[in-house]
Structures are given as C-alpha cells and as structure tokens.
Amino acid sequence: MNNIIDIKKKYELLNILILGFLMILVGMIFIFHKTYFGSIFILVGLLIVTFKKGVMIDTKLKKIKYYKKFAFKIIGNWSDISDVQYIALVKVNLTQQMNTLTVPGTFSDVQIKLNFIMKNKNVVQVITDKKSKIMLLAEKISEDLKIDIYDNSEGKKLWIKYNEN
C-alpha cells in the first residue's frame, strides 16, 4: 500500500519555464559552434526545466512535507500532522489586474483551498486548485487519515463524514 500522496503544484510563472528551454537551445547552438561554455547554458536550462514544487503527505506516519525538486534532488522537511482534526475546504476568489497592450483588464477565478485544521485550531494550508481536483484529493486524504471534511466551498456548511469514530 502506497501511503504517500504527492501533490505537484502547477508552474506559477510559465515565462521562466520558457526561459529554461531557450537556455538549453542556446547552449546547444554554442556547443554546435564549438564554444564549450554553452554547457553552462544547458546545465542552467535543465535546472530550470526540471524544477518542481509540491506537497507530500504521508498518511501512515501522519506527516506533511513542502518540497522543491531540482533534477533528482528533493529539498524539504517533514512536519508532524498527527493532531489533525479535519479537512476544511474554503472558496477563494483570485483576481489579477493585467495592464498590457494586448490583454487589458481584470482576470478573476474561483478556486478551493484545502486546509488541515489541527486540534489547537491552527490551520495548515495544503493546496489551492479547482474544485474538481481538490474534492478528489480531499476524499483520498480523509479516507487515508480517517478524518472528516468540512466543505464550505459553496457557501453552505457541509460535513462529509469519513471518520469511523
């Protein structure tokens, strides 16, 4: 049984990912022209392209890890969530103001934030995403951790019971 849930976060800045691919391309052109410092461009480009962020939840040991991954190296520390009481789903309105020549105006989006509520009422934020993805993830986590879900994503307070107690 796999007890680790790995939640990969989306790229926040797509321009940086494009820069990584361009650096790889420039490095290959430099190497093709027998300029060997192009390997530096390729190395930096590969680091940018392989960079990932995410959250790992170990449901057996009840630990959470916010990680950053470069190539094959994962950086992050495990934190204890053994006193988690329930999962809370909350609606979040995201608004972004854009002032460019081609795309003027405001972009708005509604997403759901998945939080762990601890026994001392501390809130551990896990991830924010679309409701369809968050609900499946919340159900999987609550089944594995045997805790309930408090769904306030539609403005109605709804308890989804998974706890056997």
Image (cartoon, grey):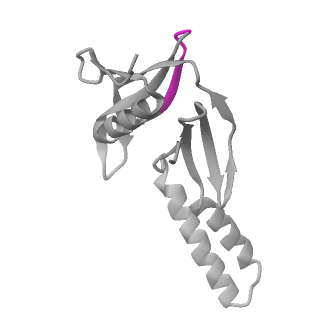
Taking the spot 60% from the left edge, 56% from the top edge, the residue there is 51
Q: Tell me how many marks there are.
A: 0
Residue that protrudes farthest toward the top in the picture: 120
How far across and how far down the image is residue 140, in percent?
A: 39, 37
In magenta, the rendered stretch is 120-126
155 lies left or right of 84: left
How far across and how far down the image is residue 105, in percent?
A: 29, 39
Residue that protrudes farthest toward the bottom in the picture: 33
Which image quadrant for residue 142?
A: top left
How far across and how far down the image is residue 111, in percent?
A: 33, 33
Taking the spot 60% from the left edge, 73% from the top edge, the residue there is 24
Taking the spot 65% from the left edge, 77% from the top edge, the residue there is 27
Q: Is residue 96 visible?
A: no
Quadrant placement of the C terminus = top left
136 lies left or right of 144: left
Taking the spot 45% from the left edge, 49% from the top edge, the residue there is 10
Residue 33 drawn above or below residue 74: below
Residue that protrudes farthest toward the right in the picture: 36
Q: Is residue 163 visible?
A: yes
93 lies left or right of 63: left
124 lies left or right of 111: right
Depth order, front residue of 142/97: 142
How far across and how far down the image is residue 160, in percent?
A: 29, 22
Depth order, front residue of 126/41: 126
Depth order, front residue of 62/23: 62
- Whether residue 121 is in magenta: the answer is yes
- Whether residue 98 is in magenta: the answer is no
Residue 63 drawn above or below residue 74: above
